[in-house]
Amino acid sequence: MHSVQIDGSHGEGGGQVLRTSLALSALLGVELEITRIRAGRSKPGLAAQHLTCVRAIAEVCGAEVSGDDVGSQVVRFRPGAIRAGRYTFDVADIKPSAGSVGLVLQTVLPALLYAGALSEVTLRGGTNVPWSPPFEFLRDAFLPAVSRAGVRARIERTRGGWYPAGGGELLVRIEPLAGPLRPLWMSKPGPLRKLTVTSTVSADLPEHIL
């Protein structure tokens, strides 16, 4: 199997290089070695949510993995066949954390589109946390946008998860692609038709903070 080496310090030196590389590795069947993971962060290496991404995509494609430990800055990933199914990925399996489940979805969604059958994914952790796409963005902006390319997926939040405790839950239903992905051209903004503001807080907080 052909192997590709990726320097994880490229760009802003965060977790995006890791997530994108893992997704493409699973899709293309290419062995991967990622070094200097999150080198641009104050605490480099795999945090709980990043390790959840690694283990989630490994389960989806039956990958052999080494370096999948908290704090690791080197991961070797050898993918197998992508498999549809019912999956549950919980950031708290690594450690109690509000790690973003939206970023875990970002890692496994591309592969499951090519799994050949319906997949149902339960994601547990942070659903609305800083520096990551919140549930409302995924439901109201991201999935409608990629549906124009042929992606058929639905998302539901059964429990909210905020910083620092997490504990939220998303249910995602991902259908296999019916044909090739269509290109998206969004080089110019369309006319503004409506502006909606959503304020979401934990039920444990008083309403006046809204």
Image (cartoon, helix red, strand yellow):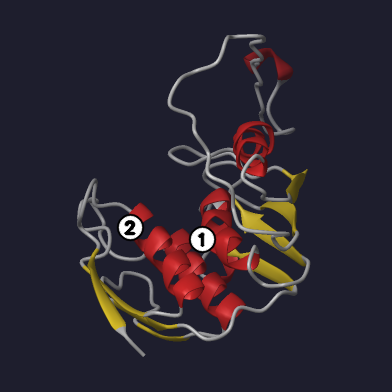
Relative to residue 63, is residue 130 depicted above or below?
above
Q: Are marks 1 and 2 in contact (CB under 8 Å)?
A: no
Q: Is residue 28 visible?
A: yes
Relative to residue 86, is residue 142 depicted above or below?
above
> Count the marks: how many?
2
Q: Is residue 15 visible?
A: no
Instruction: Name the residue tied to disc 2.
Output: 17
Relative to residue 2, is residue 189 depicted above or below?
above
Instruction: Name the residue tied to disc 1.
Output: 107
Between residue 191 and residue 174, name the one nearer to us.
Answer: 191
Instruction: Give SS at disc 2.
Output: helix
Q: Quadrant of the C terminus?
A: top right
Question: Of the numbered discs in the image, which one, if any, rests on residue 79?
Answer: none
Q: Neighbour class for label 1 at 10 Å: few (<14), some, many (≥20)?
A: many
x then y, percent, for residue 47: 39, 62
Name which residue type carries label 1: Thr
x then y, percent, for residue 26: 49, 74
Residue at image position (74%, 33%) is 203
Between residue 33 and residue 203, name the one nearer to us.
Answer: 33
User: Is 137 displayed left or right of 73 in the figure?
Assistant: right
Instruction: State how far apart marks 1 and 2 are (Cα).
Output: 11 Å
Q: Neighbour class for label 2 at 10 Å: few (<14), some, many (≥20)?
A: some
Name which residue type carries label 2: Val
Residue at image position (76%, 48%) is 154
Residue at image position (39%, 79%) is 30
User: Is 166 displayed left or right of 35 in the figure?
Assistant: right
Q: Quadrant of the N terminus?
A: bottom left
